[in-house]
Image (tube, rainbow, N blue to C red):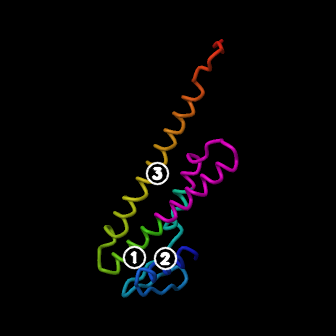
Amino acid sequence: MLWARAVVEILKFGGHSAIRTGHNIRIGNCAIRIGSSCTYIPLILMGLPFVWRGDRLIRDAIRMLFFVVVVSVANAARLYLMIVYLAKGMPWKYAHDLINHLTYGPIFILIVILWLKAMRRRLAKKSEVVPGKTLS
């Protein structure tokens, strides 16, 4: 799995000895299985409609690509921290669940806030009065 391979490389870059076997990562005495829910694909799929603005296709595509990259980098950092803390003996509810809640929720809330700001700007532009034109 691509995510497991990426996380192992990040762990090695961080100075940890990690081994990947299929979807599993072993660091010290700790073994972690990277499943599909660990990839934040559901968050990306939930966020994409909020990222789409209906602008020119290239602008929307760039915005969506940027969003996917930012969420993926945040997720890689989350997985790195989770695995390191688990390997140091931190309980699962703190190393996994707490870190997950501290990243997943705020990312989605930020997406919705940015979408609301964009919609407000779009409505403000549409309601501007153009000099010399009368409203009918």
Identify the residue at image location x=52%, y=64%.
72
Disc 2 residue type?
Val
Measured Cα–Cα span from mark 2 to mark 1: 9 Å
73 sits left or right of 53 in the view: left
| Residue position marked by numbered label 2 in the rendering | 7
108 sits left or right of 55 in the view: left
Is residue 106 depicted above or below 92 in this figure? above
Q: Nearer the viewer, residue 106 or 131?
A: 131
Q: Are marks 2 and 1 in contact (CB under 8 Å)?
A: yes
Point out the stretch of residues depicted in magenta. 45-74
Check residue 72 for magenta coloring.
yes
| Residue position marked by numbered label 3 in the rendering | 108
Identify the residue at image location x=43%, y=68%.
77
Query: Which of the marked residues, 3 or 1, is nearer the chain's N terminus?
Result: 1
Q: Nearer the viewer, residue 85 or 117?
A: 117
107 sits left or right of 133 in the view: left
**Residue 105, how many percent across, how many down?**
41, 53
Q: Which quadrant, please, contains the C terminus?
A: top right
- Quarter of the figure with residue 80: bottom left
Query: Which of the marked residues, 2 or 1, is nearer the chain's N terminus?
Result: 2
Say which element carries label 2: helix
**Residue 39, how many percent across, how many down?**
52, 66
| Residue position marked by numbered label 1 in the rendering | 83
Q: Are marks 3 and 2 in contact (CB under 8 Å)?
A: no
Say which element carries label 1: helix
Q: Residues within 10 Å of mark 1 (few under 14, many from 20)?
A: many
**Residue 94, how many percent across, how many down?**
31, 67
